[in-house]
Image (cartoon, grey):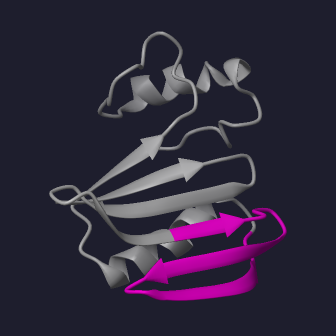
Amino acid sequence: MNVLVLNCGSSTLKCQTIDSSTERCLARSLVDGIGKEALVELRADGETTSEPRHVGDHGKAAQLVLEWAGEQIDVDSMGHRVVHGGSRFVHPTLVDQDVIDAIDGTDHLAPFTTGPPSQP
């Protein structure tokens, strides 16, 4: 199973696609400088592309990365790392609107690392 894992920071979006049976990284990406002229770095099959590009917000960064990852690899599932889920989220959790609302309520625990408010 190929799992795409997202890690959204205040001005970055990092992603890796992992083959869960071998734990091998199949592809990775970095968008650094969201909201301005960002560095977009994409790596797959031993090749790296790096270019400056205006990426207005985290939604645009995610769209760019997800489209690219989908062209490279069949993605079976996705996960998103959050810095702090309070005492409620200490294990992998299926996300629904209640989970999103609860995570948004923990922003004060790590205010500069949770990124923008969550979206389903």
Residue 116 % position (x, y):
68, 43
Direction right: furthest residue: 36
* Number of callouts: 0
| x 34%, y 83%: residue | 72
**Residue toward you, 18 or 62:** 18
Q: Quadrant of the C terminus?
A: top left
Q: Is residue 6 magenta?
A: no
Q: Principal SS element in the magenta part?
A: strand
Residue drawn at (53%, 35%) of the image: 82
User: Does residue 49 appear left or right of residue 88 in this picture?
Assistant: right
* Residue that protrudes farthest toward the top in the picture: 87
Quarter of image, res 48: bottom right
Q: Is residue 83 above or below residue 45?
A: above
- Quadrant of residue 35 within the rendered picture: bottom right
Horizontal and vertical percent position of residue 50: 66, 85
Write the start and end of the magenta stretch as one range.
Answer: 29-55
